[in-house]
Image (spheres, grey):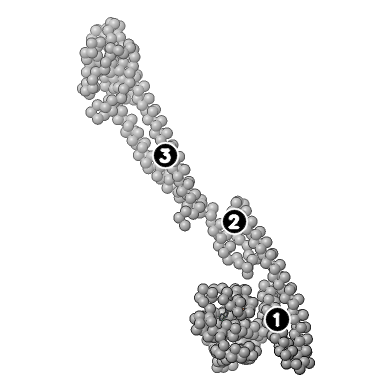
Amino acid sequence: MMFTIKFKIILAYTIVFGIMLIIFAAIIYDTTKEASFLKLNTNLKSYSISLRTEIEDELDDRDSLNLKKLSSIHAKGLIGEKFQLFNSNGEALVRDSVLSKIPMPEIKNEAVNSFKYQRQKIDHHKYHILWSKFDADNDSVYMLETATSVKDVFDELDRLFYLFLIIIPSGLIITGVAAYIISKAAFKPIAQMADTAKNISGENLDQRLDLPKAKDEVRAFGETLNEMIGRIDNAFKSQKRFVANASHEIKTPLTVIQTELEILDKKIKDVESKESIKNALSEIESLTRLTNSLLMIAKMDSMQNKLIISKFRIDELLADCAQALNTAALKKNIQINLLIADAIEIQGDKEKLKSVFLNLIDNAIKYSSDNSIISIVLEKISVEKVKINIEDSGRGISSSEIPYIFNRFYRSNEIRAEISGSGLGLAIAKEITELHKGEIKVKSEPGVKTVFSIILPQNLFALR
Ligand SMILES: Nc1ncnc2c1ncn2[C@@H]1O[C@H](COP(=O)(O)OP(=O)(O)O)[C@@H](O)[C@H]1O
Ligand SMILES: [Mg+2]
């Protein structure tokens, strides 16, 4: 779940945006720093020039300096600016208590009228210093040293830095949240389609995925899937139609063969031939059962399977079913016990319910060993409901198989070769029971016993 596409999109968005923010911040920081220093130096230079002009004036007039006037000169944009003045011998004419802490610049090699910038730390404070060498009209050379603290600039830059420290993480959080919201919205239709798709199976291929309204890639994908489901649906339908038609076509000749064999059986006296006819008839019977099962399934699929409801005694129906399969049971020396206390009338489709019970009893006989007992129990479990249990003590069904036994054509692998069958009996039983608004359940202890239970409402009309 951690590395879903959604998560990757959020991560990618956030990383890309984060990198962009950092680059952007670095550029702003650097540009601001450059611009501030440039401004500082320009101001320092104009300060130096104003000082020098005043100094030249004063030296011209009186050959002496008016210190008071000099220190009253201020530069715009500078705070705490200071200066020192030296003559050509390197003697200080004007001294500053801070600037005197650093060595006097070497002026001999500097060109006259040149400026030289330097950044230096004095008492843990950074200063921008500008040295300017000039000659006054009295032909002597002077060195003017001007300086200003850069603390303000760094304070400003620090403020900018802390601002970015707040802006960048909050920007990242906002991007992450936005990416989450956007990607969640983008993936919502996919999740919805996946939900619907999970419920589409062979039984409800007429269903389609809900498509998002926006005409986007997701919708196009959904449309493609829907078209695919449509094609599968058609393929299933034509396959089912084929099975229905084929079973229908087989039924008539089967009936004819059966009738003819029965006539033949009456005419023939020879014991060996009679035995052959009996075997052939028994095979035809199982073929007829398979054909009927297939037809039943086909009818259910085409929704023609309306119940033909009547009122009848279910205890009698169960006795009939047990009777019908008694011959098969006796062949394995299996005893069928009917445990029915009362006469119970129910409403339902008698023929279809009969095929349910025949299927269940047939299974009980088929999957039991010789000389065992099968019991059929009918009881009223509430005012409205009856329960029929069909219990055998045969091989049983392992718990891993139970989820599949009601699927069409499912047969246990172990018995496939040994015992004949179509795998349709339980599927039909379940569908008919559910058409009656009832339920079918199974409990099995492999090798000990298996109980199929059917719970039916007694009065179907009352439910509708
Ligand atoms: N009473 C039973 N005892 C053991 N296994 C059973 C029983 N009833 C059904 N089964 C298992 O369920 C499968 C499906 O049953 P069914 O749909 O009637 O098909 P079929 O009987 O044609 O194989 C069987 O193949 C068998 O493995
Ligand atoms: Mg069966």
Camera-side residue of 361 and 335: 335
Is ligand 1 within 8 Å of the beta carbon of the residue shown at mark 3?
A: no
Q: Label 2, on which residue? A: 212
Residue type, mark 3 in image: Ile
Q: Give the x, y percent position of residue 165.
A: 37, 41
Camera-side residue of 397 and 41: 397
Q: Give the x, y percent position of residue 441.
A: 54, 79
Q: Label 1, on which residue? A: 288
Q: Give the x, y percent position of residue 293.
A: 67, 78
Q: Specify few, some or many for label 1: CA neighbours under 10 Å numbering under 14, 14-19, or 20 or more.
A: some
Residue type, mark 2 in image: Pro
Does dot 3 land on a helix, a strand or a loop?
Answer: helix
* CA–CA distance in space, label 3 to label 2: 38 Å
Residue type, mark 1 in image: Thr
Which residue is at a point 57% across and 64% down the rendered structure image? 198
> Which is more foreground, mark 1 or mark 2?
1
Q: Are marks 1 and 2 in contact (CB under 8 Å)?
A: no
Q: Specify few, some or many for label 3: CA neighbours under 10 Å numbering under 14, 14-19, or 20 or more.
A: some
Left or right: 66, with 155 as reference point: left
Q: Earlier in the sequence, mark 3 or mark 2?
A: 3
Q: Earlier in the sequence, mark 1 or mark 3?
A: 3
Which residue is at a point 74% across and 89% down the rendered structure image? 273
Does dot 2 land on a helix, a strand or a loop?
Answer: loop
Q: From the image, which quarter does the C terminus lie in?
A: bottom right
Does dot 1 land on a helix, a strand or a loop?
Answer: helix
